[in-house]
Every structure is written in structure tokens, then in C-alpha cells.
Amino acid sequence: MHSDVVGRIVTALSGRGRGRSFVVTAAEPDGFVMLVDGDTRCFGRPKKKKLKHVEFHEDRLDMSQLPTDKACADAFIRKALIQKGYNNKTASEEG
């Protein structure tokens, strides 16, 4: 389970980030995943979320292309989510 979910794009189903798209950077054996979006959740401070609170999409990012610098990694993730058509605006931000 761990290797096949890393790099997958997910949408949060609950919490403050509901409706936002994230990339899975790590999976823990106790049913949690670590999520980043390059904007509110940076690579150095991922969001820990239960698997039942995320919806998996077919799209995935190639994590081997991820830059080693954290700031560059955040920009890479942010741009990749936009290029794949995932809008990271929540209902409250849209206004």
C-alpha cells in the first residue's frame, strides 16, 4: 500500500482543507498519509490525514522529478497541481 499511494493526487473530504487538492508524500502503516500542496501545506510541514478522509484520483506526480530544495519542491508541486487541472481554491476563498 505504501509505495503505490506516494505521488497520488487526492482531495480532502473533511477538515479545514476540505475540497483542496494535495499530493501524497508518504504513507504510514497505521492508515495515515502525509499531504502537501505547495501553498498552505509546504513540503517541510506536511498535513497528516487519515485515509478515510481523502479521495484518491487517478493522476499522480512523478516523485523522482521532485527537486531536493524544499522551496523548489513546493513550487514544483504547486505548478503540477495547476497543470493537471486541480483548482486549490476552497469555497470560502472564492467568495
Image (cartoon, rainbow, N blue to C red):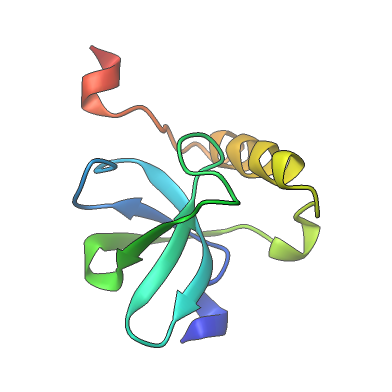
Task: From this view, report whether residue 36 is shown above or below residue 27.
Answer: above
Left or right: where 60 falls relative to 1 = right
Question: Relative to residue 71, is residue 46 depicted above or below?
Answer: below
**Residue 35 appears at what percent x and percent y?**
45, 57
Which residue extends farthest top? Answer: 95
Q: Left of 74 or right of it: where is 49?
A: left
Relative depth, front residue between 89 and 49: 49
Q: The C terminus is located in which quarter?
A: top left
Pinpoint residue 22: horizontal percent, then vertical percent.
45, 50
Quarter location, residue 89: top left
Quick one: 42 or 57, which is closer to the camera? 42
Q: From the viewer's perspective, is 35 left or right of 32?
A: right
Residue positioned 32% across, 81% down in the render:
31
Residue 76 horizontal/vertical position (percent)? 70, 42
On the rendered structure, is 56 left or right of 77?
left
Q: Nearer the viewer, residue 37 or 44?
A: 44
Residue drawn at point x = 77 percent, y = 65 percent? 64
**Residue at image coords 55%, 44%:** 42
| Spot occupied by residue 92 in the image (x, y as percentages of width and height) | 21, 21
Residue furthest to the front in view is 45
Please tell me which residue lies in front, 76 or 28: 28
